[in-house]
Image (cartoon, rainbow, N blue to C red):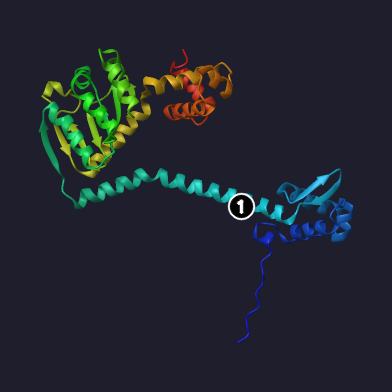
Amino acid sequence: MRDEPHTVPDPFETLGLDPAQTSLYTAVLRLHRATRTDLAQAMDGSVETVGRQLDDLVRLGVVDEQSGHYLPRHPAAALGRLIARRLDRLAEESRRIDSALGSIRHLIRDYDAGRDYRSGPFTVEMASGADVLYESVLGIAVQAPPMQLATAVPDERTMTDFVRKFADPWIDAQKRELLRVQVIVPVSTVVLPGVRDQLTRLVETGGRVRTLDRVPSWFMTAGDEVAGLPALWGGNLPDHAYNFYLVRTPVIVGVLRTLFDELWSRAVPLLLGRRGEGMMQVLRLAAQGMSDESIARQLGVSVRTVRGRFADAMTELGAQSRFHAGAEAARRGWLR
């Protein structure tokens, strides 16, 4: 049986060069150093047409122009450059795909929650007492560490109870990597005795804190499976003896997590502890026109540390660039 003839594909056509560009590049290779007129004669074409094609080859990086003469780059280098361009395009496409997948994750979560709501039980447990509430959180965290806990605290009494009696166990749980806390509090509660100190400890062990002028009600989500709701929405927990519902239904957890994310996007980050002070330091010095290297010398830290603090600040501020971060920090009064 005779083998079918095998045609080796032209590597430059494979990577996007059309036949005319490939032929012209081959002519430049053979002449090695030539003017537009020389190449037009070799290609039996007009100087204008060949000139436009040469400009394309120069832009693609496979030909160099020196004082009106055109020299080919080594084929391996030229091919490598084209491959690099193609890989850059593929990487960009990959980033776009990842971004698209990220943008629909919440839709996937809602789909799963709705399916579970239709097919599964609606599990609600009534509980009572502050000790039960805070111990329930730790009990859930132990089952699937590190658990992501998102909670909103609407009033001064609940906040005061938290910092006096219950913050320490949560802070200890963060140290042991059992849970990670995100909390939204009314800005008015930050000045209460002991609140700033405990929130600082919470942040230093990995938690995140933001403030709103008004928080609509207490609620929480513990991971993807459990949510906590007050017996009376909008009321404060101490006034109702800490009566609350633990709901183990994904559709409810998903709705409350969406509500929390919306409140979080409106809330203002509260910079606390060494990490917060470090972010404000680099932003203030950058606002004075100092470079990363100068900031590092001023603060007695490495350039890498400075850049890490900038990255943290951009994440905290939701900024896409350092300029945006500086403008947003100034708007929030961080640079005073």
| Rendering coords of residue 187 (x, y %) | 31, 17
Q: Residues within 10 Å of mark 1 (few under 14, many from 20)?
A: some
SS state under label 1: helix
Relative side of 47 to 268, left or right = right
Relative side of 235 to 1, left or right = left
Compared to 254, does 79 lie above or below?
below
Work out whether residue 271 can be spotted: no
Q: Residue at x 23, y 37 (%)?
A: 141
| Rendering coords of residue 17 (x, y %) | 70, 57
| Rendering coords of residue 271 (x, y %) | 38, 21
Q: Residue at x 27, y 17 (%)?
A: 195
Residue 246: image quadrant is top left
Work out whether residue 73 can be spotted: yes
- Which residue is under mark 1? 86
Q: Residue at x 44, y 17 (%)?
A: 334
Relative side of 41 to 324, left or right = right
Compared to 144, does 149 lie above or below?
above
Q: Which residue lies furthest to the bottom in this view?
A: 1
| Rendering coords of residue 41 (x, y %) | 89, 58
Residue type, mark 1 in image? Arg
Residue 267: image quadrant is top left
User: Of residues 74 and 101, which is closer to you in this image?
Assistant: 74
Compared to 332, does 69 lie above or below?
below
Residue 2: image quadrant is bottom right
